Amino acid sequence: MKVVLGVFVAFISGLGVGLSIDKKPAHETVGISAPAEEVASTQPRVEKIQATVKPETITSTSDEPISRDSLNELIKLATQPEQQIVDPFSQLVEKISQDANARARVLQALKAERDPLKRAKLLSALSFVDTPDVVAAATEFITQNDSAIREDGYNLLRSAQLTSPAARAILLDSLTREENESALAAAISALVPESTPSTEDQVLIVSELNKLNQHVSPKVRGEVILAMSRWNPAAEQTGNMIQSALTSSDADLRDSALTALVENPIRNEQIKTSLVNLLNDAQLDSFTRWRALDTVGSYNLTEKEKQTIALVRQSLPVPSEN
């Protein structure tokens, strides 16, 4: 669990602080924002909740039940800035992984939360869970008219689709149905293969990804490149996608191609040539050139190429942290 959580540190770092959970009417529609004054009146501060709400023990499926107040406090701590979140966030993920009632409370908090930064942290915690109730919540989100909520639904299925055929089918269907580019990009990103994907899934998903490589949105095409490098890294088509993206004028596409090359051992002479061209391009930002330099270092290089790279390395400015 600790190893997996490390992947999400960058994703959840630097986000907003604090979270309170209030009971909401059962008929409240997901994602519809109430006026600011109404939200202020119906969402008292945590201090008020602690002073007025009596502790109520939630029946747990684990050996250690957690009180409602304790769960509220754990959620609040888990959404603090980076230097404070590691232990509470890990505890929250562990608790909702094993306790259906605690999981229901966090799902309730997610539906009620209006702050996008706090929602992102709750989504991050829930995305580790592959239980049917999380799949059901994600399915509810995906039926909403708000594309941002549909995007949340796709992100919720990231872990579930590894073990749930129903969850993977939902994501696969979204590749042909979703019209919003950000939501579609999230659906593509959530389709991560297990260590040994089934041939049937691989054929279906790769077929849809090849179609989406013609999408008008560079954001969608960038996610297609990353997904293809995971689902079918040895395919000639995948190498061609990466090669094309490396020579694109779109910075996001180039970044996706470089990330794909870091994540997967996709190597050919055309890609190597494009990487050398990138690191020699003085018009590009130094960060992109350094990434190209680091990536090309894993290729078999001629003596001339080694000399060229050494000269570039000596003269290339260190990327700014800003």
Image: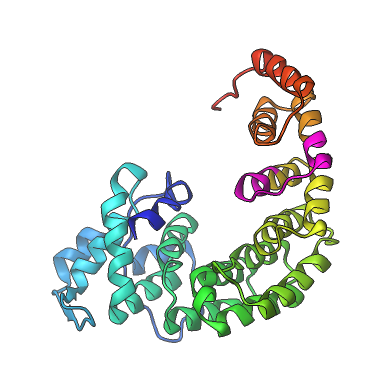
Asked which colour scheme the image uses, the reply is rainbow
Q: Is residue 75 above or below residue 106?
A: above
Q: Is residue 198 above or below residue 9?
A: below
270 is within the stretch colored magenta: yes
Q: Position of residue 245 (x, y in %)?
A: 80, 46
User: Which picture quadrant has residue 237?
Assistant: bottom right
Location of the N terminus (image quadrant) = bottom left
Q: Is residue 13 above or below residue 194?
A: above
240 is within the stretch colored magenta: no
Q: Position of residue 219 (x, y in %)?
A: 73, 54
The residue located at (56%, 80%) in the rendering is 167
> Along the horizontal axis of the image, is 258 left or right of 6?
right
- 237 and 92: which one is in front? 237
Does residue 143 appear in this view?
no
Q: Which residues are magenta?
A: 258-274
Q: Position of residue 34 (x, y in %)?
A: 49, 69
- 252 and 240: which one is in front? 240
Location of the C terminus (image quadrant) = top right
> Along the horizontal axis of the image, is 132 left or right of 189?
left
> Along the horizontal axis of the image, is 310 left or right of 70?
right
Q: Is residue 228 above or below residue 7?
A: below
The residue located at (74%, 27%) in the rendering is 279
